[in-house]
Image (cartoon, grey):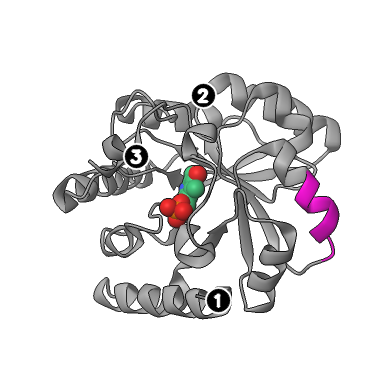
Amino acid sequence: MPIKENLEQVKQNIARAAQKAGKRPEDIVLVMATKTVDPERIREAILAGGQIIGENKVQEALKKYEVLKNERVRWHFIGHLQTNKVKDVLKFAYMIHSVDRLSLVEKLDQRLQHEGRSLDILIQVNTSYEESKYGIAPEEAVSLVRQAAKYETLNILGLMTIGLFTRDEIKIRKCFKLLKEISDKIVKEDIHRVRMKYLSMGMSNDYQIAIEEGGNMVRVGTAIFGARNTPDAYYWPSEKTDEERQG
Ligand SMILES: *Cc1c(COP(=O)(O)O)cnc(C)c1O
């Protein structure tokens, strides 16, 4: 299916799920996950109305950014971020979804101070408790938010998670419910400068579920661009087989 039609289908599904959750379609932010997608196809998606790109690898993103930097689109970083890539990620990223440790917070703050600016971030939480997934442990998430909030170059705007890869909808929902709970807890603590504006959860297989559970930022790749040739193990730390991933 052409990208335009796929995108329209995804938007319709988002609208339906939003309605179910008592929200308006425009309350849900769609991030197009563009890992492995070449600039021409990304441009097609932008022309079809896509407004945000989410990239996983700094080097890959920089190459695409060179080609697409004049397009009217915002770049989010959604992959695991190594501290030695902080300077490069800041060349294109408008928001980082994957802040999951204090050492990264410190490095981002140093660089942002140097550049004299601030950055919108989300804290990534490992709600599936899978060893192969990055993200702070759910039990430590509130504490990391409290600590990160002290760095004035960083605007903490919410949380991000990757749901469990399984066909078992109950288990997927459990991940998303947990992220919502943590977010509610943080709201209750009323931490200075912290806003829980975004819950970034939901991918091609589970974005409708994520929206029903309170998510308002979904990261969708395959449903827009089709299946990837490169295994996700290249982007994620896991060595899992497809079968394990399917659950
Ligand atoms: C690849 C990726 C997505 C999108 O995955 P699809 O299943 O292709 O929709 C979302 N979030 C992250 C962090 C990703 O790496």
Residue 217 position (above or below residue 13): above
Q: Residue at x 14, y 50 (%)?
A: 170
Query: From mark 1 to mark 2, how far is it between C-alphas?
Result: 39 Å
Q: Position of residue 68 (x, y in %)?
A: 80, 60
Q: Return the residue nearer the eye: 66 or 23.
A: 66
Q: Secondary structure at mark 3?
A: helix
Image depth: mark 3 or mark 2 in front? 3
Image quarter (top left, top right, bottom left or bottom right) of the C terminus: top left
Q: Secondary structure at mark 1?
A: loop
| Residue receiving disc 2 | 101
Residue extent of the magenta highlight:
63-70
Is tag 3's residue or tag 1's residue first in the polypeptide sequence?
1
| Residue receiving disc 3 | 242
Dividing the picture into quarters, in which one does residue 104 lie? top right
Instruction: Report the side of 4 relative to 87 (left or right).
Output: left
Q: Residue at x 48, y 39 (%)?
A: 232
